[in-house]
């Protein structure tokens, strides 16, 4: 893949993330800094499709990223993103207030992650087999989840998420952050989804799970930053941060 094609792939991923609509050459030129003709963009998009990075849902539509396209973007095109100072302050304040009230930290964490990400969030303590989730309503409003079978698969996977954790964590090293896309997904029931996972231990040595669940076109960098910051607040150690990204 040449540099221009990399730029085109990144632009398609970023535009599709915002709109949930297939991206055509004219829209791509309008919203990117590419200084080439529409015909050149179309040719490059066709090449990217032939090589498996993009696909065209309908003959007359634009293109959207494939799992392979997302994988290339994450490894080569995604820029690191940081939480704003206001978001960091909000997380610290809410956690401190709720800790003072002796609120359940796992429940609080899920609620905060859902509010800041606009997606479904799951938080749990593995040792205690204690899990909470917030944001199902927001998830169901996404265009990817208008089909009942997609919803049923996701709900079924959530119902048994605690039983799947060993499979996920067995593929991880402490401290690493890893993204599973599509067929890479270690949870077979949602093999059309992606996950980003980062194991850690908290101050008490408990193992837990934080999760953000949303469309595959979610803001990977932003949500990774959100979870990494939450990991630092929680003190590291026995928990695992997981982002589920549904197709």
Image: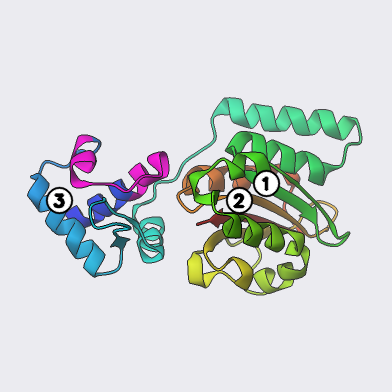
Residue 39 — which label?
Answer: none
Residue 121 — which label?
Answer: 1
Measured in 3D between alpha carbons, the distance from the residue under mark 1 to the one under mark 2, in whole angstroms, is 6 Å
Secondary-structure class at tag 3: helix
- The image quarter containing residue 55 is bottom left
For residue 24, above or below residue 242: above
Secondary-structure class at tag 1: strand
- The image quarter containing residue 90 is top right
Residue pointed to by mark 2 = 213
Q: Position of residue 195 (x, y in %)?
A: 57, 60
Look at the magenta stretch and give its main secondary structure: helix
Residue range (magenta): 13-30
- The first of marks 1 and 3 along the sequence is 3
Q: Quadrant of the N terminus?
A: bottom left
> Please, which residue is most extreme toward the right here?
102
Residue 172 at least partly seen: no
């Amino acid at each position: 893949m040449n540099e221009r094609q990399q730029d085109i792939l990144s632009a398609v991923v970023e535009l599709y993330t915002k709109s949930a609509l297939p991206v055509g050459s004219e829209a791509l030129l309008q919203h990117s800094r590419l200084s080439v003709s529409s015909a050149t963009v179309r040719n490059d998009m066709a090449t990217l499709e032939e090589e498996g990075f993009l696909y065209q849902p309908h003959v007359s539509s634009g293109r959207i990223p494939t799992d392979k396209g997302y994988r290339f973007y994450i490894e080569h095109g995604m820029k690191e993103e940081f939480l704003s100072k206001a978001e960091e302050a909000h997380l610290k304040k809410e956690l401190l207030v709720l800790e003072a009230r002796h609120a359940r930290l796992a429940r609080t964490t899920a609620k905060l992650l859902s509010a800041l990400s606009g997606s479904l969030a799951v938080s749990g303590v593995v040792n205690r087999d204690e899990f909470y989730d917030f944001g199902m309503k927001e998830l169901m409003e996404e265009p990817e989840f208008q089909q009942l079978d997609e919803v049923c698969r996701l709900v079924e996977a959530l119902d048994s998420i605690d039983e799947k954790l060993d499979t996920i964590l067995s593929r991880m090293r402490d401290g690493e952050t890893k993204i599973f896309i599509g067929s890479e997904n270690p949870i077979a029931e949602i093999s059309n989804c992606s996950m980003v996972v980062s194991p850690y231990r908290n101050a008490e040595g408990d193992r837990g799970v934080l999760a953000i669940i949303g469309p595959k076109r979610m803001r990977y960098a932003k949500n990774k930053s959100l979870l990494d910051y939450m990991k630092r607040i929680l003190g590291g150690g026995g928990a695992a941060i997981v982002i589920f990204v549904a197709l």
